[in-house]
Image (tube, helix red, strand yellow):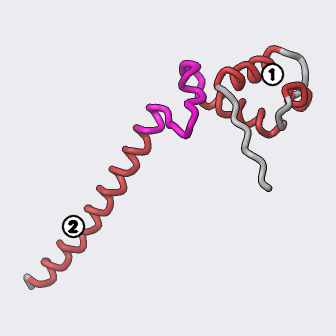
Amino acid sequence: MASKRRQFSREFKLEAIRLLKEGDKPLKQVARELGIRADTLRSWNEQAEGRVGMSAGDVFPGNGKRTTKDEELAALRRELEMVKQERDFLKKAAAYFAKGSR
């Protein structure tokens, strides 16, 4: 029987990162004291460092939600891909019609 995946609140993650940064204990010891895996704490720390300057609510949006910057980036990437496809189509069409006018 598979065990249910544990979920942690935003406040717990922020507190864990604060303990890691403020204390003089190594990452593994902090993780052990909190009852979480060291690689989980490491990934939370990397996420927080990657989103420096954001409010606490944006660092860990939770429930699969993206931050507004991540949403904007994804939308821009989709738009760029569509524009590239249109450009490639127009190149092929221009080449086809140029070949027919000779």
Quadrant for the N terminus in the image: bottom right
Q: Earlier in the sequence, mark 1 or mark 2?
A: 1
SS at badge 1 = helix
Kindly check if marks 1 and 2 are in contact, taking CB atoms under 8 A apart as contact. Answer: no
The residue depicted at 43 percent of the width and 38 percent of the height is: 71
Residue interval drawn in magenta: 51-71
**Relative to 91, 52 lies left or right:** right
Q: Position of residue 54 (x, y in %)?
A: 54, 21
> Which secondary structure lies at badge 2?
helix
Magenta stretch, main secondary structure, is: loop
- Number of labelled discs? 2
Pick whichever, 100 or 11, lies toward us: 11
Left or right of 57 on screen, residue 75: left
Residue in the image at 49% along x and 32% along y? 67
Name of the residue lying farthest toward the top: 22
User: Toward which corner of the image does residue 18 lie, by quadrant?
Assistant: top right
| 85 in relation to 48, above or below | below
Residue 52 magenta-highlighted: yes
Image point (17%, 72%), residue name: 94
Query: x, y (%) of residue 55?
Result: 54, 19
* Label 1 Cα crowd, 10 Å radius (few <14 / some 14-19 / many 20+): many
Q: Position of residue 9 (x, y in %)?
A: 66, 27
- Which of the two residues, 31 or 45, is positioned nearer the viewer here? 31
User: Residue tagged by mark 2?
Assistant: 90
Q: What residue would you read off at disc 1? A: 20
Alpha-carbon distance for marks 1 and 2?
Answer: 54 Å
Give the class, few, some or many, for how many residues have Cα within 10 Å of label 2's Cα (few <14, many ≥20): few
**Tag 2: residue type?**
Leu
